Image: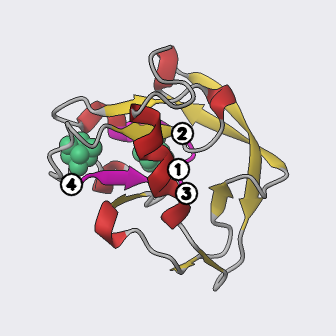
Amino acid sequence: MTHIVTSLCLRDGACIEVCPVECMIPGKQEDGWPWIYIDPDTCIDCGACIPECPFEAIFPEDEVPDAYVAKDGTVISDAEGSEPYDAHTKIGGGGTVTIAKTRKLKAGDTIDLKPGIKPNYDFFKGGPGYGK
Ligand code: SF4
Ligand code: SF4
């Protein structure tokens, strides 16, 4: 198994610092969501990254929800979004990165986070951004 970073990720980079096996890799911002990839062959499913995430974006693969219930103001980054979001990040020396497409949800909105699983595996098969 592995853990998965879902579209709730807003790329602050906190999780990367605690991973004991350094298997969390930031994709290039221009490659779009997902922002952080987890190498499924290296992840030891320790769960250390989960409490570090201020947006509760990380799940064990078999617990990624298909009907995540949002709190008011939850921001997700995905292809349907149209609002830019300025994220403060520790990645790449730190600073601010603008995520081009986000959506702000209302309390009770439900979203399927499972589409985050396949791109994670595709990345390590040589998908967009891999090896750059
Ligand atoms: S579950 Fe553990 S090994 Fe896997 S990405 Fe998170 S911190 Fe790293
Ligand atoms: S801690 Fe959460 S929001 Fe920050 S980069 Fe990791 S998954 Fe994304």
Q: Mark 3 belongs to which amino acid?
A: Leu
Dominant secondary structure of the magenta stretch?
loop
Q: Residue furthest right?
A: 82
Sequence-wise first label, 1 or 4: 1
Is disc 1 surrounded by few (<14), some (14 to 19) or many (20+) residues within 10 Å? Answer: many
Q: 4 or 70, which is in the foreground?
A: 4
Task: Residue at 45%, 56% (x, y): give it.
Answer: 117
Q: Is residue 88 left or right of residue 4?
A: right
Q: Quadrant of residue 110?
A: bottom right
Disc ID at residue 35: 2
Sequence-wise first label, 3 or 4: 3
Q: 45 or 104, which is in the foreground?
A: 45
Element type at marker 1? Answer: loop
> Does mark 2 have its CB less than 8 Å from ligand 2?
yes
- Does 115 lie within the magenta span? no
- Does 3 lie within the magenta span? yes
Q: In 3D space, how far apart are the residues under numbered discs 3 and 4 (Cα atoms)?
A: 17 Å
Sequence-wise first label, 4 or 2: 2
Q: Mark 4 belongs to which amino acid?
A: Gly
Disc ID at residue 91: none
Q: In 3D space, how far apart are the residues under numbered discs 4 and 2 (Cα atoms)?
A: 18 Å
Task: Residue at 33%, 71% (x, y): give it.
Answer: 63
> Does mark 3 have its CB less than 8 Å from ligand 2?
yes
Which residue carries the number 3 mark? 8
Q: Is residue 75 left or right of residue 94?
A: right
> Does mark 4 have its CB less than 8 Å from ligand 1?
yes
Which residue carries the number 1 mark? 9
Q: In 3D space, how far apart are the residues under numbered discs 1 and 2 (Cα atoms)?
A: 7 Å
x and y, in percent, of residue 86 in the image: 71, 38
